[in-house]
Image (tube, rainbow, N blue to C red):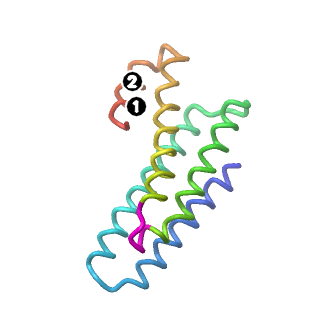
Amino acid sequence: MELFHDLVYVVAVSKLAHALLNGNDLATLGLFTLCFSLVLWSWMNGVYYFDLHGNQGMWSRGFTFVQLVFAAGASLTLDDAFHDDHRPFAIAFSCMQALITFLWWSTGWFDKEHRTLSVPHSTTYA
C-alpha cells in the first residue's frame, strides 16, 4: 500500500510539472510553487507518521487507505487548480490535512509517552 501511496504523489508531481510546462507567466510559477509545497508537505508528514507510528494492523492500513483516497482526489483535481477552480483541490487537500492532523494527535491520545510531542506538533500542523 505504501507503493500506491507514493505513486499517487508521483502523479501529483507530474501534473504539477505539466501545468508548469504549459504556463509561461509568473502566476503559474507562483501557483506551482504553492501547490508543490503543499503536496510535498502532506507527503512528508504522511510518510513520517506511518514510518514512526504505523504498523501492520487494521488501524494503520485503514487510515493509510483513507489518506490514499484523499491524496488521489487532490492529485486528480490539480488540473482544475490551474484553470481557476481551486475548490475541488482545496477540499481534497483539507480533508487529507485533517486526517494527518488527527493521526498525529491520536499518537498522544493512545500513547502517553508521545503526548508531550504530539500535542504541539498536531496543533502547529493544524
For numbered disc 1, what is the local secondary structure? Answer: helix
* Cα separation between marks 2 and 1: 5 Å
Q: Is residue 77 magenta?
A: no
Query: Residue 44: image x %, image y %?
Result: 47, 49
Compare residues 85 and 44 and report the one nearer the observer.
Answer: 85
Q: Quadrant of residue 4?
A: bottom right
Query: In this picture, is 8 found above or below 65?
Result: below
Q: Is residue 53 left or right of residue 125?
A: right
Q: Is residue 37 left or right of residue 5?
A: left
User: Which stretch is magenta?
Assistant: 81-86
User: Label 1 sits on what residue type?
Assistant: Ser
Query: Residue 98: image x %, image y %?
Result: 47, 39
Query: In this picture, is 62 found above or below 1?
Result: above
Query: In this picture, is 112 found above or below 31?
Result: above
Q: Residue at x 29, y 83 (%)?
A: 25
Q: Which quadrant, please, contains the C terminus? A: top left
Residue underneath mark 1: 122
Determine contact: label 2, label 1, CB under 8 Å: yes
Q: Is residue 82 magenta?
A: yes
Q: Residue furthest left?
A: 26
Compare residues 91 and 43 and report the one nearer the observer.
Answer: 91
Q: Residue at x 52, y 58 (%)?
A: 74
For numbered disc 2, what is the local secondary structure? Answer: helix
User: Label 2 sits on what residue type?
Assistant: Val
Residue underneath mark 2: 119
Query: Residue 86: image x %, image y %?
Result: 41, 62
Q: Residue at x 49, y 66 (%)?
A: 78
Q: Is residue 6 left or right of residue 112?
A: right
Q: Quadrant of residue 27?
A: bottom left
- Counting other residues with Cα less than 10 Å from the Cα at mark 1, is it few (<14), some (14-19), or many (20 or more)? some
- Secondary structure mostly seen in the magenta stretch: loop
